[in-house]
Image: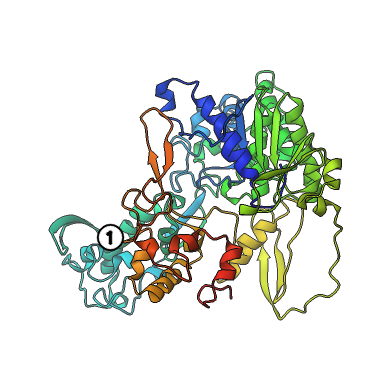
Amino acid sequence: FTGVSGSGKSSIVFDTVAVEAQRQLNSTFSWYIRNQLPKYERPQAEAIENLTTPVIVDQKPVGGNARSTVGTMTDVQPMIRALFARFGTTTDKKPSSLGVSAFSFNDPQGMCPDCDGLGQSIALDLDKMLDRSKSLDDGAVLFPEYKVGSPDWQIWAKSGRLDPAKPIAEYSAEELDTLLRGTGGKVTLKTKSTEFQTNYEGLADRFERLNLKRDLSALSDRKREVIERFVTDGVCPSCRGARLNAAALDVRIDGKNIADYSSMEVRDLTEVLTGVTEPAAAPLAKAARTALERIVSIGLGYLTLDRPTADLSGGEGQRLKMVRHLGSGLAGLTYIFDEPSIGLHPRDVGRLNELLRALRDKGNTVLVVEHDPDVIEIADHIVDVGPGAGVHGGEIVFEGSFAELRKAKTRTGEALRRGARVKEEVRPPTGELTVENADLHNLKQVSVAVPTGVLTAVTGVAGSGKSSLISGAFMEAHPDAVFVDQSAIAASSRSTPVSYLGLMDPLRKLFAKETGANASLFSFNSKGSCEECQGRGVIITELAFMDPVTTHCGVCEGRRFKPEVLEHKLRGKSIADVLELPADEAVEFFTEKALLPK
């Protein structure tokens, strides 16, 4: 499926074909199971026939929490754990008596007790937490939640154990220990509405218990950013980043423990497993090796099993998702890919094409939304959507082969025929931004000077370290840089492009100035919202054990506002009329500086 961005490719493939296939598949299960599954609404199509079970491989980042690694995502790590549990020996050559769970950093039996299996040690930095020149009364504690007067602050200042007017720098060793690690006794705390007692708890103990002994990735971005200002992190000194306890790390196969296996590049680990020839262990080693060889075959042999999935680039993540399906014995499925070539080096696109062909040749249907000519070229059938984007798209403008598409009078056909031109003049840089001795992931003591005032492209094969260099090392060295990544926009169901861009407020003020009405009247989240649908424009009816039903609101006809709001006009258009304008028409309509592009 080809066409310009916004032409409707994803609407056909994902919002129509994929949704209906998922909906019909779920309908084959019992009501009990269906109630546990996601609900899919029937798409707006008269008929969709000959569907098969869908497997969707989208662009969403792999993500995962701090405990998710390449090994856990690809299901290779459980095989390695079983191998060590059954055939590993301790350093004194005795057979291991540990179970499989004892080799898992996500299980209490196996995780390092000091870092809880995270491999990272995060500690409170007292120099960042305390202004020792001040007293408790003067705000010596800098953590926002422990500000003067707060319930937490009262634990120490109102305990009777410490002088709240005395500068921290003048505390004796005993007083400082009481502030940071003291225990025992009750403290009476007061708020505006109540008074209650709580146990005395030292500042450091309280901060660590509530903020550090948990997965920081599960917190909101704002909360995590605040906490990170008061801590230092590094490799756990107990397990040295291995995540496991001493008993698990003591078990070895041919002199290597499970942490050694996990830290090896996949291509090297594949060779090591070839050397496991003991008859009882060989089948398990072979199964793990087969899974690893699939990872190597798609160009990811440089990864390690202990690599966190949150650190993977978009291209790496999508190919790992594909690996999970290559080992499947199922046939007759419909695989649906969303621009799988994104983030791939031209060298790796060839490997991607081989994977797509392999899935097809197993008897599956493969649907691909794509822009890359090298991927489009291998398709057996091409559907071009257009002719333009948005309201100018939504039609099938071509169907046929790649050779026919090159001759077609569509935007895609024209782009395939057009040759690229090399830029002749290059703008001189105005300065440079440096990165010194970066060694994150695949980077090997890399130092680079990025020129300023010009457009710089960072290139290289997938996995060479581009993302590590820029999103990791560069952003750490220059935190004020604006980082635009591939993550989804964090927004509520009421968020719209105009509100996300910060243009809704000036737009409301413009209508208020023109009409003399209150600005809040022109918000579908405030006074102007339709009372029937609460400003959503649609009414979603959740039916027990049934798929939800979404209908346009019959009162506002999907326009979100009360009828009286729409009577107020700006140059002949209501607020709903303006919000329905395509962006290119909106640029022509508005003359006000607050809304025009800068």
Q: Which residue is mark 1?
A: 202
> What's the residue at 54%, 72% (across, down)?
590
> What's the residue at 65%, 36% (across, down)?
336
Q: Residue 225 in the image: x percent, y percent? A: 45, 62
Mark 1, residues whose alpha carbon is within 10 Å: few (<14), some, or many (≥20)?
some
Q: Is residue 293 left or right of residue 586?
A: right
Q: Residue 92 in the image: x percent, y percent? A: 58, 32
Q: Residue furthest top?
A: 279
Compare residues 174 and 511 and report the one nearer the observer: 511
Q: The N terminus appears in which quarter of the rendering?
A: top right
Amino acid type for the residue under numbered disc 1: Gly
Q: Residue 194 in the image: x percent, y percent? A: 13, 59
Determine the secondary structure under disc 1. Answer: loop
Q: The C terminus appears in which quarter of the rendering?
A: bottom right
Q: Note whether residue 105 is visible.
A: yes
All told, the count of numbered labels is 1
Q: Residue 185 in the image: x percent, y percent? A: 16, 56
Compare residues 345 and 152 and report the one nearer the observer: 345
Q: Is residue 62 above or below residue 96?
A: below
Q: Quadrant of residue 542?
A: top left
Q: Quadrant of residue 396?
A: top right
Compare residues 419 and 274 and report the one nearer the observer: 419
> What's the residue at 64%, 57% (across, down)?
440
Compare residues 251 and 129 and report the one nearer the observer: 129
Q: Quadrant of residue 545?
A: top left
